[in-house]
Amino acid sequence: MIHFDTLRSDIKNAVIELAGDPYQKVTSITFTDYIENDQKAIDFFRDKTLDNGEALPEKNQLEYCCNASILNALSYIEKNKMAQRKAMASSKSKSELWIKLAEIVSALPKHTYPHSLPTNHRKLKDRLKQYLNEGYDCLIHKNFGHKNSEKINDDAKSFIFARWCDRVKRVTSYNHLLKEYNTEAVKQGWKEIKSETTLINFLTDPKIENLWYGHRFGELKAKEKYNFQFKTSLPTMRDSLWYADGTKLNLYYADENGNRATINVYEVMDAYSEVFLGYHISPSEDYEAIYHAFKMAIQVSEHRPYQISVDNGSGNKKLESGNFLNRISHLAIKTAPYNGKSKTIESAFGRFQSQFLAQEWNFTGQNITATKVSSHPNMEFILANQDKLPTLDQVKETYLKRRQEWNAAAHPKTGVPRIDMYFESENEQAPAVSPFQMVDFFWIERKEPITADAAGISFKEKKIQYDYVVYEDNSRSVDVAWHRKNVDNKFYIKFDPDDMSLIYLYQKTPLGLRFVKAAETAPIVVRGKQEQEDLHNEFIKSIDIKNKTLRKETRDHVESILETHKMRAIDYGFNDPILKGIEKKERAVKSEQIKTKKTDIGQYQKELSEAVPSENDIYKLM
C-alpha cells in the first residue's frame, strides 16, 4: 500500500530482486483501474435524438459510453505524471507513451469493453484531442441514423406523402410513385430520386406510416394495427360470461324452388368452456332469433349468467326496449362496434366452421376474406350436384349433429371435453333459474287483458284461436267453482310462444302483476253421440253434476241470507221457482194457494218464440 517511487533505493533494489521491476509489468489490467463509468455520458447517449428523429439503439449507446470512459482514462494518464510513469514503464518519450497506450487499448477484451477506438497510436491521440474539444457528440458516427429520405426536401416529402394517401387518383406502387415524383421534381426544381428505396425508407418510417395507413388501407385496418390493445384473460368459471352473435350457417340447402340457398344461425356460447348453449336458425338475425337462442341457453344451463356480451344489432335493440337482456343476466354489455377481436365467439365460430362444418360436401366456405384454400367451397362440385342438395330440415339436423360434436370435443387449452368443463364448473354468482323466473324471462305478456266467461279464457294470437280452462289442483277435472266466481273478471296473460298448452293468469295491482292461476288448453267435447267416447261421456257427466251442485249451493246460500232478514219470496207470500233440471217440485207459500193456471218457463219461452208480431209491434220496431 506504499508507492514504489517513495521507497529508499536499497528497498527498491530489494523489491526488484524479489518481485521484478513493477514498471515493466504495466498491463491492461492496471490501465483498467483508471476506467470508470461516465454517468454524464450514459445520460447523454440515452437521451440523444438523431436527425431522423430516432433514439440511439442500446448497442450503440453502450459502445459510445465505453469510448467515453476509455478516453477519460487516457486523458487522466496524459495529465497525471505519476500515471504516466506507471504507464510508460521504461518508455522515455511521449510518443512511446502513446504507442504503449494504443497497445493497451487494443488489448482490452471486447466483451467487457465494446469500444470502437482506433488502434493506431496517432489516431487514438487525435481522437482524444477531438473528444476534449467537441465532447460526446464526436463519438457518434457521422452517418449513423441517416437515411436516403433525408435527401428529400420538405416540399418534396409533402408531395410524396399526399400522392401516397390519395384515395381517388391512387398510386399503385412505389415504382409508380417514383415516376410521378421525378416528373414533378423537374417542374419544381427538386432533386430527382434514382431508387424506390428512398421512397420506401421515407414512407415506411413508423412516424410516417401510421399517418397514411388509414387513408390507404381503411381506417378500421389502421385501428386494428395501431390502436392500443389490452391484454385480456378469459373467465375461469362457467356462466361468468356468455357471448352471443349471429352468422351464416355455412351449409348450402335447396329451397322450395330447388335453388341453392343459405340461412343464418344465432348462437349463445359460454366463454369459459366454449360450449354452445343455445341457438336458433332463421332467415335473419332478428329479435325472435335472439330470444329463442337465449331461451334455449338458459334451459340448458338452468342458471342465470353473470354477464352477457352482444353486438349492437337491430334485434338486440328491440329486446333492449323490453329490458330482456338485463332481466336474464346480471350485466348485459355491448361489444365495441367494428372490433371483432373483442368477441371470442367469432374465433370459436371460425374453428367450428373449419373443423366440423367443413366436413360436409355442401360447405359454403368461411368468410370471403379467408386466405386458405380449404376455407372456400368446392363450387365446381356443388354446382354439378345442386339437385342433390339437402332440404332445410336436413341441414338443421346436420348442424345439430356437428354442434353436439363441437361440445363433446376437447377444449384446445385444457384437453377436457367442453361439455365436461362446463358442467363440472360452478359459479356462485350465477344462481339457478326457477320456473317462475323462466316465465318472467321468456313468456310474453299480452298488452290487453282478457275477460273470462262461462267457457273459460279465450284469445287469438297470430290469427289462431286459443281456449283455456283452469283445472282443479293435481287433477284433470275443470275447476268449475273457480270459473263460476270469475266470469267477467279481467286477467292479464303470459304465455310461452313455443308451447301454447299452458298460460298464466295475472291481475294488475298497484304493486304490479299478481299471479292468480295457471290455465291449460280447454277440452273439446264432441256433440254427436256417435263420435263420443266413454271419456267424453264421463267428462260431460262430471261437469253437469258440478254445475247443478253449484247452482243449488248458490241458491241456498242466498236464501239463507234472505231468511235472516225475512226477505225470501215466501216471506212475502210468493212462490220460489224451482231450479230447472234439478228440482221437480215448486216451493210454495204456506198460506192457501190461489188456484191459477201455471205456465212453465220453458213453455213460456216456446210460446214467445212462436208468437207472430202484430202490425203495431212491427211499427214500433221500425
Image: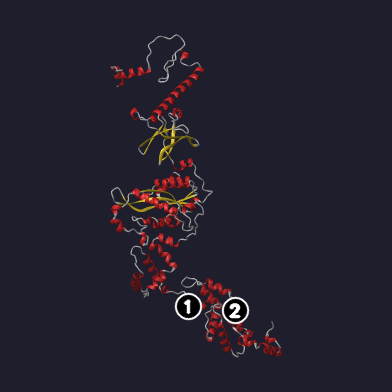
Give the colouring mode of the picture: secondary structure
Is 604 situated left or right of 485 in this image? left
**Cβ atoms under marks 1 and 2 closer than 8 Å:** no
- Asked whether residue 98 is in view, the answer is yes
Quadrant of res 205: bottom left
Q: Residues within 10 Å of mark 1 (few under 14, many from 20)?
A: few
Q: Residues within 10 Å of mark 2 (few under 14, many from 20)?
A: some
**Which residue is nearer to you in this view: 267 or 174?**
267
Question: Of the residues shown, which amino acid type is indicated by label 1?
Answer: Lys
Q: Residue at x 44, y 13 (%)?
A: 588
Is 440 situated left or right of 373 in this image? right
Q: Nearer the viewer, mark 1 or mark 2?
A: 2
On residue 142, the disc is 1
Quarter of the figure that contains the C terminus:
top left
On residue 35, the disc is 2
Labels 1 and 2: the sequence-earlier one: 2
* Residue 430 against residue 83 in the figure, above or below: above
On residue 235, the disc is none
Q: Provide the secondary structure element on which disc 1 rests.
A: loop
Question: Of the residues shown, which amino acid type is indicated by label 2?
Answer: Ile
Q: CA distance from mark 1 to mark 2?
A: 26 Å
* Residue 370 against residue 448 in the figure, above or below: below
- Asked whether residue 343 is in view, the answer is no
Give the x, y percent position of residue 343: 44, 55
